[in-house]
Image (tube, coloured by chain):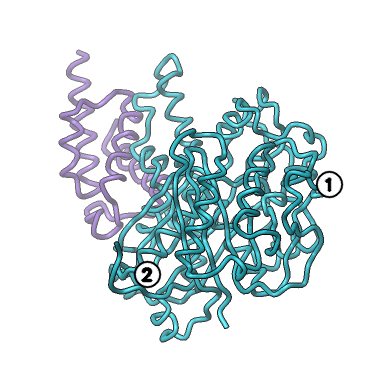
Chain colours: A purple, B cyan
């Protein structure tokens, strides 16, 4: 998955699931869009589906520092890289 | 022993979702014209094919919600019902936002068992045989399904920071909500309480009562003819769905706001039979009625109207009739409002209270529907069998639940 594809999927997810239209990639999601801990957990479920892979407890804990769309995309990229490396 | 401050408590707003309509006009129209809200039981592809009772008190009209996602995301169907009636009651009362979030407004709201629809989806994950998704249980499924989901979704939606009471005592859930809300204001802990209950469409409850042989089955082809409280041909209760909310305020607070006062709550009683969890108990019910009158500081002769629990079961109606007669004799008009809409479980107490307020305002008593031939064991009461022009000054709303819980709410018309 390219960065562009990840951004597109995340924005689509935010629009359809969270009803947040066109958030800025560096917007503070909590302060500007009311994105809370419940949303963060829901987001992790979507990421598991996106990657077709279950996230470990440690991986989920890392997501709790996420504040922006760019952070989410960084997080997904890092997970994808780790999974690609472990499957080689 | 109680002492000190005892304040007056009034009802200043209400809203309901019932099988016989939403608005006061709709509900009164159904009552005046004897139109039942009991319909065929909706299929659920799970339990409905196996249930002998094929009737249900049905909300079959669309309820329009305009909740934002931030509120919707923690709500199952039961919380949608609860938040909608709470929203309408609060909007109708016109409380300012500063008061709503001040900590002086609390919530007393419950349901029989949260959201069975959401719980059912969780069980699918447990018992489905295979995991088809990586995480089948949603992060918010507990918030949607938990027993106090109605109360806390209301607090979240309106930013309410006062006390939260979430009774879950089946058929006495919402009468307890009103009663405990009333006491919270009466004794000075809160200045206002939004109180009520809700229960969504659910065949689990029907199956439970069906297995206990308590559900009506003889009128599956003519749902509008059942339940039949106090009637010789009654054959059991009809489960239903619905929701209701009343806003209670301390009298002086309401008066100073200049808000219309619909009625005063003057008494509440709650006790337990102290034994069997299913069978109605004459001693327990009679005592609840007596305690209610004592708390209200009135004599039995002052009560004009009794909204009986009257589910239409063989024994329940007889025991309740005896209890009413023992305390009141044949004076007050007695009506079983469930004859119109079935038994909406956790919401029946508040819906029946709201209807009592409507009847009080309009000065008539609607008859018990389907009461064609009064069971001789219930015949000693002053049953209302046809529309009766009659001012109601004081009304008692009685509810009894599995677990042996009994309640009696007493409300009074404001001069």
* Displayed quadrant of residue B32: bottom right
Quadrant occupied by the N terminus of chain B: bottom left
Q: Position of residue B322 (x, y in %)?
A: 65, 48
Callout 1: chain: B
Residue under the point 69% across and 64% down: B331
Camera-side residue: B329 or B179?
B329
Camera-side residue: B218 or B373?
B373
Q: Position of residue B305 (x, y in %)?
A: 65, 64
List the residue tagged with mark 2.
B186
How far is the residue under mark 1 from the one under mark 2? 42 Å
Residue B327: assigned label: none
Camera-side residue: B328 or B173?
B328
Residue B373: assigned label: 1
Residue under the point 47% across and 65% down: B267
Callout 2: chain: B
Do pointers 1 and 2 mark residues of a single chain?
A: yes
């Amino acid at each position: 998955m390219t960065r562009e594809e990840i951004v597109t999927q995340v924005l689509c997810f935010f629009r359809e699931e969270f009803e947040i239209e066109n958030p800025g990639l560096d917007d503070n999601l909590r302060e500007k869009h009311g994105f809370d801990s419940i949303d963060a957990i829901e987001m992790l479920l979507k990421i598991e589906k996106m990657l077709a892979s279950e996230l470990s407890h440690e991986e989920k804990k890392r997501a709790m520092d996420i504040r922006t769309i760019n952070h989410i995309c960084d997080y997904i990229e890092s997970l994808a890289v780790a999974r690609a490396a472990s499957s080689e | 022993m109680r002492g000190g401050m005892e304040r007056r408590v009034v009802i200043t707003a209400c809203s309901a979702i019932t099988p016989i309509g939403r608005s006061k006009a709709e509900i009164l129209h159904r009552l005046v014209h004897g139109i039942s809200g009991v319909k065929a039981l909706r299929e659920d592809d799970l339990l409905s094919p196996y249930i002998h009772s094929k009737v249900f008190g049905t909300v079959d009209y669309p309820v329009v919600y305009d909740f934002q996602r931030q509120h919707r995301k923690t709500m199952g169907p039961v919380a949608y019902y609860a938040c909608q009636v709470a929203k309408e009651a609060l909007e109708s009362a016109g409380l300012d936002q500063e008061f709503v979030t001040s900590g002086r407004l609390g919530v007393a709201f419950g349901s029989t068992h949260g959201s069975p629809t959401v719980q059912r989806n969780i069980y699918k994950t447990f018992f489905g045989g295979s995991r088809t998704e990586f995480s089948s249980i949603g992060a918010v499924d507990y918030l949607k399904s938990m027993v106090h989901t109605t109360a806390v979704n209301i607090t979240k939606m309106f930013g309410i920071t006062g006390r939260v009471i979430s009774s879950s005592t089946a058929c006495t859930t919402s009468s307890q909500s009103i009663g405990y809300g009333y006491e919270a204001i009466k004794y000075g802990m809160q200045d206002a309480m939004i109180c009520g209950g809700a229960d969504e469409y659910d065949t689990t409850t029907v199956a439970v009562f069906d297995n206990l042989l308590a559900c009506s089955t003889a009128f599956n082809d003519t749902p509008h003819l059942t339940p039949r409280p106090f009637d010789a041909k009654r054959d059991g209760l009809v489960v239903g769905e619905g929701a209701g909310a009343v806003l209670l305020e301390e009298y002086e607070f309401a008066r100073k706001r200049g808000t219309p006062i619909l009625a005063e709550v003057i008494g509440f009683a709650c006790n337990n039979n102290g034994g069997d969890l299913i069978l109605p108990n004459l001693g327990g019910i009679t005592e609840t009625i007596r305690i209610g009158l004592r708390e209200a500081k009135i004599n039995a002769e002052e009560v004009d109207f009794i909204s009986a629990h009257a589910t239409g079961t063989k024994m329940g109606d007889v025991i309740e009739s005896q209890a009413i007669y023992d305390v009141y004799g044949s004076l007050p008009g007695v009506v079983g409002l469930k004859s119109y809409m079935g038994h909406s479980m956790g919401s029946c107490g508040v819906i029946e209270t709201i209807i009592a307020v409507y009847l009080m305002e309009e000065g008539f008593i609607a008859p018990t529907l389907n009461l064609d031939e009064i069971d001789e064991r219930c015949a000693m009461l002053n049953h209302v069998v046809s529309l009766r022009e009659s001012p109601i000054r004081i009304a008692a709303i009685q509810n009894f639940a599995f677990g042996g819980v009994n309640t009696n709410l007493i409300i009074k018309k404001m001069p």
